[in-house]
Image (cartoon, rainbow, N blue to C red):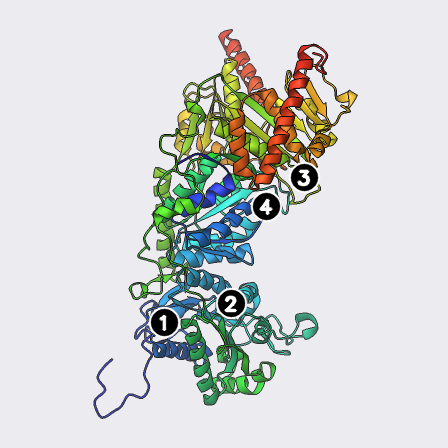
Amino acid sequence: MHRQLMKGNEAVVRAAILAGCRAFYGYPITPASEITEAAATLMPKVGGVFVQAESEVAAVNMLYGGSSAGVRCMTASSGPGISLMQEGISYLAGAELPCVIADITRGGPGLGNLGSEQSDYHQVVKGGGNGNYKTLVLAPNSVQEMADLTRLAFELADRYRNPVMLLADGFVGQMMEPVEFAGKALEPGTPSWAVTGERETRGNMITSLHMKFDDLERHVRHLEEKYRCAEQLEARVERSFTRDAEIVLVGYGIVGRILKAVVAEARAAGLRVGLLRPITLYPFPTSEFRAIASHARCVVVVEMSTGQLVDDVRLALNGACPVEFYSRVGGNVPGHDEVMALVTRLAREMDLQARLEEMGVAHA
Amino acid sequence: MPEIGNTYEVAFERPKSMYAQFDRKEDLQHTTHYCAGCGHGQVHKLLAAAIDELGIQDRTVLTSPVGCSVFAYYYFDVGNVQAAHGRAPAVATAIERSRPGATVISYQGDGDLSAIGSAEILHAANRGENITVIFVNNAIYSMTGGQMAPTTLVGQRSTTSPGGRNPATEGYPLRMSELLATLEAPVYIERVGLGDNRQIAQARRAIKRAVENTTKRLGFSMVEVLAPCPTIWKMSPVEAQRWVKDVMEKSYPLGVMRDRVKDAEPKPEPMVAPGLAEIPGLLGIEAAVPGEASRSGHRRRGKAVHLGVRVAGFGGQGVLLLGEVLAEAGLEAGLEVSWLPSYGPEMRSGTSNCHVRLASEPIDTPLVTMPEILVAMNEPSLRKFDASVKAGGWVIYNGEEFPAELMREDVHVLAREFTREAQALGDPRVANMVMLGALLELAGVVKAEAIHKALTKLVKSPKWVELDERALARGRVMAREEREQVSRGCGVMVG
């Protein structure tokens, strides 16, 4: 395959179709609309289904129907639309239906604005629907990852029979970069549990309803077991100069890219700075954080939210390392220079502390 | 079935499409969970009989709603999908679209269909989805204990309309069949009742007809069934059945609301899906040309390139296209590239800008906060971004009068009426390409051949490509002249 220039949003649909996705149900919203538009053009060409739904509520329930019928299917939206989908996501997880949902995050709360934020972390990673469920969440930081992680999302969705979410900010959705679509076009078979309107599947039933208390408890424990498995097997990160880093920067999506530039500049200035970028937000890469805690003297979380990812970082570190937090919101991006200034200040403080320690002066 | 003996001819029996024993039910597996005299039992039997008669048990998929009939899958020996409250038409839509061989039936109550699911039913009907909807209307929320529904009759008491439904505050009974019959797409809508045996016989015919339409792929069919709910209505089964006929029917007249069955064309057969090998081509994914290296900066030789560009102007000036051609040309030249738009409401009048990076190494951040080159297509953009330009960089400004207060000692300036130049070339709209030409000359990172390739890829009309090429050439000349002046020490660059 050849590298070609493309928007992240456009890459998602192509990667989805290559992964065997043959149904897309969408409702337009900035900055995710290109996904729906590309699906409207491409799905019919490959014999797939495209429906523009009357609302995100309908779209997510179409996912429920398409997935029940054993078809790889997806939708895409942004903050307010994802909020409307939360009902359906809970049903999908409850009925163990695989599907992929992309959230190209914009500013909030409410209508917020069309700028890029990372303020959907909680509603996507923690879930906004009712009941004990989880969605697996992948966080691409480039157009290439938009493609690669979309393909992975379909694999994980089928493997765990669970919705998988792609959480990208508006920048990653809107920007163009070269992308290469690795891997052949897939044709996944129909899963045995699906309801397809054929004799072999007549006895199948899809539901999230379990009237007997013991039945529901068994079901919820089964879901819990799946999530424990995913936590063991699926956590993914990108590490950059973390081995000897005293200051570890943490951010996902576009912030991960900015932090990479900061690491390069800091290293050039002789500062031992590294980057730990979660690629899966659920399962959260807890063990990676525990590992850096052994040598890092400070972890700096940078987000385009008032502090959502940072909660998980703090939980993972469990007090093993101090955590600093820096954020911009409203559509503003944490500037490379702003983060660099913070890193320089922290390094100076640490250096000062070390010198005080050398001098035998206790530092409060 | 146990042998009954040869002396009897079986005239009526349980439909095969209903389970003989309800294994999915926790207990009492030989009776339904419905109350005595409930309409659902009857409608279930009529529907199962229709499925039997049409011989479609294997291909039937039933979506069950939330409400008393949530457990329809206890009883129907067909493919079953249980949906969220009101959403069955959306669920059914997707099943049918992906499995056009299936006969998809959405079974719904009146709270489910006419209240919470009013959008889903309206739009499924309006799209003319090839599904049958069985709409059981008993004028009340039964499963939750008797609250008012949109279908509750005027004056009818419920736990949430204890004084009786008052139209002044609660509106009137919602006549869904009539409402949906105002749409173009539905092929068949009929309201039937369970008020007496004659009505039940008509209900049986209507249900079969609707399902038959679906098997023939004729489009959207719905049968609304006025059904008794003795328990919530606090009546005996006999009284409740009479109430359907004597009272309910007055608000909900029986009859055919839509019948376009005769003229209906079956939905087109789904296309034969292309082979997997064809998929990349259909997606516009470029296959690698044999012998040609992948377009990757890692394989490029020569001097290191790190170019950050910010392009800004009014929407409609071609700001984003300028950036896109630059990025595409960079990729053609074997560089790493990124293009990031500032996106906003889809309007023409606003300002617009984009960040472009070209580099010989992988690009960390695609954001260009300190550009080496700023292309300012209007004065507001210049004012916004002038201060951000890196020392030693260039500002390419569309205007001869460079505002004195924005003059910096540490950047070069190329200020010209690019729009006028473009006008002279034949169209003011190619000002962006004149400016791009100037940029390319100053940056010196991309050869003309790569630009040509990028242009022909992004600009479809040969006429425009030709004009754009001339514009680019003009821009290059303008930049060259400026640079020569600078090197002679009489340019705008003072630093």
Q: In the orientation shown, which residue stands out farthest toward the top?
A: A359
Query: The N terminus of chain B is located in which quarter?
Result: bottom left
* Secondary structure found at label 1: loop
Amino acid type indicated by mark 4: Thr
- The dot on residue B128 is 2
Indicate whether A251 appears above or below B265: above
Marks 4/1: CA–CA distance:
43 Å
- The dot on residue B315 is 3
Q: Residues within 10 Å of mark 2 (few under 14, many from 20)?
A: many
Q: How many marks?
A: 4
The residue that mark 1 highlights is B76
Marks 2/4: CA–CA distance:
28 Å
Amino acid type indicated by mark 2: Gly
Residue A306 sits in quarter: top right
The residue that mark 4 highlights is A30
Marks 1 and 2, the one that precedes in the sequence: 1
Q: Position of residue B329 (x, y in %)?
A: 52, 30
Amino acid type indicated by mark 1: Phe
The residue that appears at 44% across and 45% down in the rendered structure is B283
